Image (cartoon, rainbow, N blue to C red):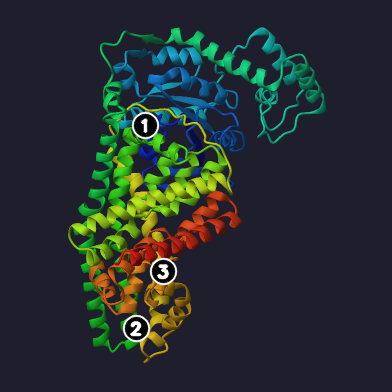
Amino acid sequence: MKNLRIALVGNPNVGKSTVFNFLTGLKQQVGNWTGKTVEHKAGYFKVNDLAIELVDLPGTYSLTAYSQEEIVTREYILNEKPDVVVAMLDASNIERNLYLLLQILELTPNVVIGLNMMDIASASGIVISASKLSQTLKLPVIEVIATKGKGINELLQEAIKTSRRDEAPQPIKIKYPEELEKKITEIENDLKEGQFPRRWLALKYMEGDQALEVEPPESIRKLLLEWSQSGWNEAKLEMAITDSKYQFIESLLPKFVQVNKQKGASWTERLDRWALSPIWGYPILLGILIIVFWSSFVGSAPIGDLISKFMAWAARDLVALLQIMGGPQWLQGLIQDGIFAGVGAVFAFVPQIGLFFIFYSILQESGYLARAAFLGDRFMQAMGLHGKSFFSFVSSYGCNVPGIMATRTLENPKDRMITIFLNPLIPCVPRLGVMSAVVAVFFPGGRGAIVMISLLVLSLLLIIFSSFFFRKTVLKTEKSPFVMELPLYHLPTLRNIFLPAWEKTYSFIKRAWTFILVASIIIWVLSNYPAGVPIEETWAGQLGSALSVIGNPLEFDWRIMVALLFGFTAKETTLSTLGILYGVAADTPQSIAYAMTGAMTPLVAYIFLVVYMIYIPCLATVVTMHKEIGSWRWTGFGVVYNLLFSFGVGWLFLQIGHALGF
């Protein structure tokens, strides 16, 4: 069996992921590139006698060194040397896409072009001849409509064919102006053959690329210094090289592109008149968000109830079987009140999370999420944040882990860190589930809606306060401008909706099963031993008594403190912990919340909701924070800030409540 490694490269929103998902299906491995916060996706499959590894490289506009995506992509091509690079081009925006292609050709000639979105280009009045494009670039070109699966198998076969050629392709070479070409050649001739292509290395030395792994020889440093003194500094050289590439592209376009006068506005332009309107854009955004969250919570409720009832039924039947077999009492209690109570309460949230990620995929694949970020930029800037933080915050309402990972779109390191620190202040689906159960019991009817809205508004106000606090103190930085491309609207495919949603939901289930099972067993042991004593005298009771020093100023019951403590393992454990401590079966989250009514007043319940909404994030979120920040010191700072901030805000609201007579 022979091995073949193919790299998928292209601009953002060009259809790479659609091709990748079509070819790999569920046979994917997702992680991070070593030492980077950029996602690594690789898929594995077989075609006849070939074992193929398909790597979906990050979407990028160029291969300079201004972002981690650019560095990761070019380092992979240079160091891993894939057998074939499949360059996906957007036919509706061919000029900008060709710029990246020219940079790829400076690294490797083994390139196959996937010309995607031909249908969209045609609808926009752009006609591209794939055969003439192939003749011009001297590379194989395959027409693709990725959303419909057309041309993808042909693209794969062409990549396999290219890998089997005895001689490497001889693609077109860019023609630089005579003066610039002379300088490139002068440096190129002074370089020895090595790991990197000499011409590419010469260009990088001229541009002053800071991410190069190879230092220029002394002779080249002297030459660059002489040029700089004569007016050809790094900035001017880089600009000249970039301009030359675009001029070269402009000279090629007439050979294969024909632009017909379009009749009327395109669908994207028509939709954007409403979606980006300063009058209608925000109501549309609000309406979409309401539909997403209402559907995620209300629409998933029946499925969540069925899961809760199934877990309770399975626990009762398993315990009954153990009783017949004479199983020990402690094992029966562990299974019913420990494992099934804990895991069951968590799995009831899975439908909510799954539905949320389905809606998130629809918004992302359709192109609307970029519009939402554009609309949200005005508010983000008012909060002292970058517009791209909107992606992170929206994701966090599903789960803080992908929300933190979404900060990778932010180029400024301080903007990223601030957004990461603010992220846990947004209540995720598990926290919202616990909050909604408590609100339904303590504030029934219309009051519950008012209380939930007040909590979400409070969350936003605390984010604004914390943002200005971080920006003016520990992470002083100026506001960054918001620049991003608005992709054309697309009709998402079912594969591109459900595959990413399944990956994220499965990741949550796997994490929940691992953390919650262990946490539930530990909590059950702590709340049942020493055996035969009142629960206040168990290890959990003793732990709660020790924590009462912190809880007393907020009038928290010791059980609440234990639940908050174990909530660090995963927020989903809070209800299951309370269920175990109050001795309530986990048939429904509300049954546990009802048991809390004897331990606190509505005011204290509201304070609990405030603290629970913003206190330290779960263990998985903390691990992700460290992974993205790369420093335990800053991660610890974020955790301590959330802890002190939540209890401080809770105590303040308690005093205000008492002063108002509640």
**Label 2: few (<14), some or many (≥20) within 10 Å?**
few
- Relative to 538, does residue 157 appear above or below in the rendering? above
Whether the residues at callouts 2 and 3 have beta carbons within 8 Å, the answer is no
Toward which corner of the image does residue 435 lie, by quadrant?
Answer: bottom left
Q: Does residue 661 lie above or below 488 as drawn?
A: below
322 sits left or right of 419 in the view: left
- State whether residue 571 appears in this view: no
383 to 612, vertically: above or below: above
Estimate the spatial distance between the alpha carbons at disc 1 and disc 3, rounded to whole Å. Answer: 52 Å
Q: Nearer the viewer, mark 1 or mark 3?
A: 3
Foreground of the two, 186 or 340: 340
Q: Earlier in the sequence, mark 1 or mark 3?
A: 1
Callout 1 amino acid: Asn
Residue 153: assigned label: 1
Q: What residue appears at the point 42 percent right and 62 percent down from the top-left corner?
A: 652
Under tag 3, what secondary structure? helix
Q: Position of residue 499 (x, y in %)?
A: 34, 45
Where residue 369 sits: x, y (%)? 35, 36
Question: Mark 2, mark 1: which one is toward the viewer?
Answer: 2
Tag 2 secondary structure: helix
Separation of marks 2 and 1 at Cα, in angstroms: 55 Å
From the image, state whether disc 2 or disc 3 is nearer to you. Answer: 3
